[in-house]
Amino acid sequence: MLKSVSTCLSCENLIENFKCKIHDLEVELNNVCDSHVFKPFLTKESSCNNCVSFNTDNCSHPKQASESLLCFDWKN
């Protein structure tokens, strides 16, 4: 059985360029800390098109956002 693990990649504190917004550090794929906040996982179907922020004032990258793109701020 597959399980989800707690890593920085599954944390809502991860921002662009693999940077942690809490610790202001660039993280590696296998890092995790006590400030980890689980973020719903992306799937191969994830894109701006199914992000709740797409075409709203909450979108972090409104000029770049399009139906086929995906950024670190994706939310379901």
Image (cartoon, rainbow, N blue to C red):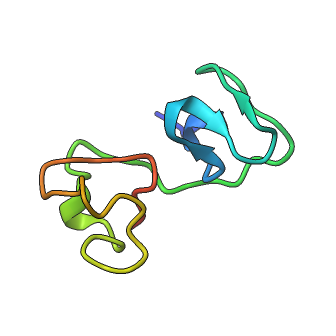
- Give the residue at the far bottom of this rendering: 57
- Give the residue at the far right of this rendering: 34
In the figure, is residue 68 to the left or right of 58? left
Q: Is residue 1 visible?
A: no
On screen, residue 50 above or below 1: below
Residue 54 or residue 75, whichever sits in front: 54
Quadrant (top left/top right/bottom left/bottom right) for the C terminus: bottom left
On screen, residue 25 above or below 71: above
Please state the horizontal and vertical placement of residue 23, each as a whole percent of the image. Answer: 81, 39
Residue 6 or residue 3, whichever sits in front: 6
- Give the residue at the far left of this rendering: 67
In the figure, is residue 70 to the left or right of 26? left
On screen, residue 72 above or below 75: above
Please state the horizontal and vertical placement of residue 29, each as a whole percent of the image. Answer: 58, 21
Residue ID at (23%, 57%): 65
In the figure, is residue 28 to the left or right of 46? right
Residue 60 or residue 44, whichever sits in front: 60
Please state the horizontal and vertical placement of residue 57, each as a whole percent of the image. Answer: 38, 80
Q: Is residue 16 visible?
A: yes
Residue ID at (34%, 74%): 52
Residue ID at (35%, 58%): 61
Q: How many marks?
A: 0
Residue ID at (38%, 68%): 59
